[in-house]
């Protein structure tokens, strides 16, 4: 039996120490890249110095990753070299094979899988634990990592890949959307809370024409009517602000507020004939249909308005939008004691959904937690017409985007009711075609 050289003990100890360092680098890499920047930011604002160190490190991820990989590869290569020397002393020429086998098992199990699994399970706490040490390592390796960055960027530029300093592929809003969807899918965020977050993030992407009340559904008053008739119509309406037009609905001359009507009636002791409607009306506020909800919300706050008439590029009235409409895009439908219940989405016993044609795709998606596209159309009827490239007849059925649409009612050229049902897994249906 070959006698073990006692001089190999320091070499074995060095290999074990290097494996511990490799585990440290591997765990640090996983923890610092997997940690939540939002949580670290919150902890830093609360005065946690450990979180501040983590934020300082991950602010320049490229330099951090470069330092970790450099350190990890150095200790792994050195450990493998020492192990090879030790196994050559023990087993001769077969020591190379033994060193390769043993070091592969040790590195994979103890220096890669184990520390990374622990870091994935506790990324925030481990990141704050290793941050003070990693800060000095990053500083020590800074000259070398800078050279490596230049070499990597130069090499990638040769194949047409250019990395700009601080370049971000996704916006902050995209990152937030992804985080919200992930937490919802994992069960950490209820659908209602998910919808509120998503609605707030979408304000910059939705325009007024997507949520406005169409002109066909607006209650308007003819200013030429007698004050008594006009006031009677205003009081019968379920709305507090009503547009006033002269001669034609396109010619909006003012907005009548129910509160102003009641005040005027009080002052006139109930005699409507003494009220001058034109003087009582307020100046109408017009907003372009391409205005985003975020911009319109700012406009409402700045102008102290709650009501805007939406116009197209030619100045024609397209519809109206209120402050409540924008808020509902965030928090969902708000109904007060004067709102009439609108049954636009009606689940059926067979699993299908009967939908009024004027229901917006966004509202249907929110109500049913679906994901129908709304880039080409605003309403469900508009989506069907866009995909069918025609105005379908009652009874026609179409299948697209994973759902089956059957036309239930149609009035002239307007689709008023549609039955929608998800296509079951395994069920075949031709997309974009009449079935």
Image (cartoon, helix red, strand yellow):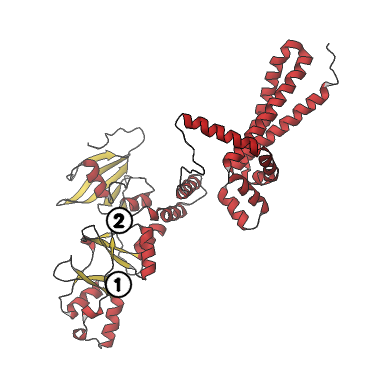
92 on left or right of 279: right
Observer able to see residue 22: yes
Q: Dot 1, crowdedness within 10 Å: few (<14), some or many (≥20)?
A: some
Residue 49, compared with residue 76, is above or below; it is: below
Quarter placement of the C terminus:
top left
Per the image, the residue denoted by label 1 is: 240
For residue 127, the mark is: none
The x, y position of residue 376, in whole percent, is: 28, 46
In terms of image quadrants, where is residue 224? bottom left
Q: Which mark is residue 290?
A: 2
Along the line of sight, the residue nearer the viewer: 418 or 346: 418
Mark 1 residue element: loop
Q: Is residue 286 above or below residue 389?
A: below
Secondary element at image label 2 = loop
Vertical position of residue 174 compared to residue 289: above or below: above
Residue 116 visible from this viewpoint:
no
User: Front-most of 395 and 127?
Assistant: 127
Residue 204 x/y as whole percent: 39, 54
Q: Quadrant of residue 358?
A: bottom left
Contact between labelled residues 1 and 2, with CB atoms less than 8 Å apart: no
In terms of depth relative to the viewer, which is nearer, 11 or 147? 147
User: Rounded to the nearest whole Å, what is the CA distance between mark 2 and mark 1?
Assistant: 26 Å
Pinpoint residue 110: horizontal percent, then vertical percent. Answer: 69, 30
Q: Is residue 299 left or right of residue 244?
A: right
Q: Which quadrant is the N terminus positioned in?
A: top right
53 in relation to 106, above or below: below
């Amino acid at each position: 039996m070959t006698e073990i050289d006692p001089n190999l003990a320091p070499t074995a100890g060095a290999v074990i120490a290097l494996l511990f360092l490799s585990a440290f680098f591997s765990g640090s890499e996983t923890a610092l890249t997997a940690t939540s920047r939002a949580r670290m930011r919150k902890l830093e604002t609360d005065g946690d110095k450990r979180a501040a160190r983590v934020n300082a490190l991950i602010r320049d991820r490229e330099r951090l990753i470069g330092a970790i990989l450099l350190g990890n590869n150095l200790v792994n290569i050195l450990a493998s070299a020492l192990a090879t020397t030790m196994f050559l002393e023990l087993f001769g020429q077969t020591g190379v094979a033994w060193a390769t086998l043993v070091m592969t098992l040790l590195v994979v199990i103890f220096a890669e899988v184990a520390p990374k699994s622990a870091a994935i399970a506790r990324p925030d706490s481990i990141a704050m634990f290793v941050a003070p040490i990693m800060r000095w390592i990053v500083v020590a390796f800074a000259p070398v990592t800078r050279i490596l960055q230049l070499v990597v960027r130069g090499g990638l530029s040769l194949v047409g890949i250019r990395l700009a300093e601080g370049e971000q592929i996704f916006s902050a809003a995209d990152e937030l959307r992804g985080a919200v969807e992930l937490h919802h899918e994992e069960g950490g965020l209820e659908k209602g809370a998910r919808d509120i977050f998503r609605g707030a993030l979408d304000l910059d992407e939705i325009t007024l024409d997507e949520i406005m009340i169409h002109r066909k559904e607006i209650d308007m008053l003819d200013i030429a009517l007698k004050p008594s008739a006009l006031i009677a119509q205003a009081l019968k309406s379920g709305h507090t602000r009503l547009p006033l037009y002269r001669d034609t609905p396109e010619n909006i001359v003012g907005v009548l507020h129910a509160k102003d009507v009641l005040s005027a009636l009080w002052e006139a002791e109930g005699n409507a004939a003494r009220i001058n409607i034109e003087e009582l009306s307020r100046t109408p506020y017009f907003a372009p249909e391409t205005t985003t909800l975020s911009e319109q919300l700012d406009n409402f706050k700045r102008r102290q308005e709650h009501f805007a008439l939406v116009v197209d590029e030619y100045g024609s009235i397209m519809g109206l939008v209120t402050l409540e409409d924008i808020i509902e895009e965030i928090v969902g439908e708000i109904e007060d004691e004067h709102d009439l219940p609108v049954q636009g989405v009606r689940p059926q016993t067979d699993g299908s959904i009967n939908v009024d044609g004027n229901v917006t795709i966004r509202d249907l998606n929110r109500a049913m937690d679906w994901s129908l596209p709304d880039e080409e159309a605003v309403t469900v009827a508009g989506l069907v017409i866009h995909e069918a490239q025609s105005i379908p007849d009652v009874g026609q059925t179409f299948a697209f985007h994973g759902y089956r649409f059957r036309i239930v009612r149609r009035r002239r050229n307007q689709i008023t009711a549609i039955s929608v049902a998800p296509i079951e897994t395994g069920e075949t249906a031709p997309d974009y075609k009449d079935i």
